[in-house]
Amino acid sequence: MPSGEPLSSIGIKVHVRIRPTAKPSPMFHIEDQTNTVLIDLLKQNGGGAPESFVDQIAFSVNSITQSTDQSEVYESCGRALVKDFLEGYNATFIAYGQVGSGKTYTMAGDMKVNAHRGFIARAIHQIFEEKEADPGSGIVLYISYLEIYQEGMYDLLNQRSKDLMIIEESGYVYIRGLAKIPVETEAQALMCFSEGEKQRSYACHQINQVSSRSHTIFTLCMEKRVGRFKTEYDTVVAKLNLVDLAGFERLKKTNTSTGGRMRVEACSINKSLCLLEQAVYAIKQGQEYVPFRQSKISIILKEALSGNCRTELILCLWPEEYFLDETIKASRFAQRLKVLRTFSIHNKKIDCCVLNERRHAQEIANLQQELALKDALQGRPGLSFDDLTLENYSLYSRSLKYLCELNMQLEKVLSEHGLVEPIEEPQETESGVGELTNQGFHVGIAPPHARPHNPSASKPSPDEIHCSHLMLDYKEADPSNDVWETGSSFRNHVSCNITIRISFCLFI
Ligand SMILES: Nc1ncnc2c1ncn2[C@@H]1O[C@H](COP(=O)(O)OP(=O)(O)OP(=O)(O)O)[C@@H](O)[C@H]1O
């Protein structure tokens, strides 16, 4: 993909991961060839007993895996997205499903056993592998770890953090106060992740012994320098969000229906997921107003759902009879999400030099306008400043500086040798060829200050613009010798009988 080229819209990918279960439902099927999840529905017979499996709902997805092998799942669902991130594209990977379906197992896994490490540790490994393989790429990485617990936002990498605030600026969402920890090695990054994990809110209930009570977003930000002077844009930046959503739960099934903290947590989780679903539905329907601001997780996922981001979702399913309703509900959400389209831009940060150049270009444009206005007022129409480009401008500024220095040098050297009188008031010379001999010709090359001007033409040609160099030639002051040397080594000849010629043409 050529740098800086925006991509056309891309669809959100949905992968399904089916967790192992002792009692799989006979009504749950998968069709590997077409990547379809099929669920049989019982037809109710006038409120009586179900007649037969007559209806079937089909959910088509991008891939389905029943593997318990973490590495296999990462290779098929994660590696490509992390590669996109390393190339400079924003990416988000979301784990979604009911409680106990395997979201945290997929994202975090078990850090103590290598083979059981989840998506986050594997992504970190892939990123540092790439960084180390190409030390010249200058990859710089930062980590943030955010938790949304009962609509409050907390920094898992800073225990003292209070409820953080979301800032939305020019369509981008930031979390004010969220730490961005620079990490140089894989070990440092894993350490950050493990420290954050320790701060997460978990609880034990009937369905899951270690159930997440919050949504978490582990973010890796990358800056990749691509050579300061090679191109205009020299830093590629990208963000990888790894999202472990809390699972929706039926209060009766988790046995948290009798009040207390876990019930409040469950209600908050269910509500936020329901609001996220509403936002997804609104985008899918093409509604003008999308209710992102109704919940923290919705607004944080705004970019992943409809902005500059490559987004993939892993739908974790637990295909037991007991959870069939939850399986259908989760599959419906994923199906809606799958039709959403985002876009993806190769993100580049403009460096200060370029910004300065742009500022100069703007300044020139403003000055040109002013000068044109002045000329018009003074009755000098027809002068054009179009050819004074940024390049010419810097050439001009350099010539000017050079001129001033040379002028002083020239005066000094010549007056030291008693060849000329020091010049108090520099003559204003706009253009032309001055000739200086050791006979005492007064020389003054004044820094031009009026405007880009060539007396011989109303509009300077680009060639003439390039003449704004000062030429310093010298030759032996022998009239028969017509060979001019160029350069400032006339200093060595000054005591001899030489002629110095200064030619310049400035558009001032
Ligand atoms: N694909 C899988 N292979 C092996 N074990 C799994 C798999 N998925 C889940 N498990 C096991 O099931 C249990 C529950 O998984 P996990 O905690 O990841 O669910 P969850 O969706 O994150 O639940 P919650 O929403 O309550 O946090 C864990 O003990 C985990 O090890």
Image: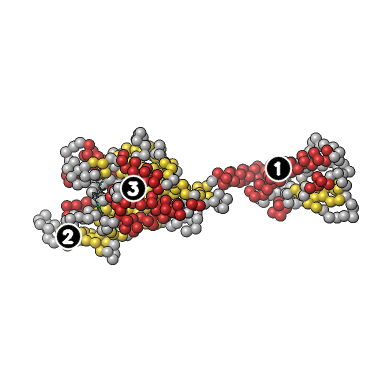
The residues bearing labels 1 and 3 have C-alpha atoms spaced at a distance of 57 Å
- Please report whichever mark, 1 or 2, sits nearer to the chain's N-terminal start: 2
Disc on res. 243: 3
Which residue matches tag 2?
Answer: 26
Mark 3: C-beta under 8 Å from nearest atom of ligand 1? no
The residue singled out by tag 1 in the image is 401
Q: The disc labelled 1 sits on which kind of residue?
A: Lys
Horizontal side of residue 145 vs 274, given as left or right: right
Numbered badge on residue 128: none
Whether residue 18 appears in this view of the structure is yes
| Nearer-the-camera pick, 195 or 5 | 195
Q: Position of residue 87 (x, y in %)?
A: 45, 54
Q: Is residue 260 left or right of residue 239?
A: left
Residue 402 % position (x, y): 72, 44
Residue 448: x, y in percent?
A: 73, 42
Query: Residue at position x 61%, y 44% from top?
Result: 360
- Residue 38 occupies which quadrant of the picture? bottom left
Q: Is residue 450 left or right of residue 101?
A: right
* Labels 2 & 3 near each other (Cβ < 8 A): no
Q: Residue at x 32, y 56 (%)?
A: 71
Colouring used for the render: secondary structure
Say which residue appears at 25% left-offset and 64% top-offset.
31
Residue 162 found in image quarter: top left
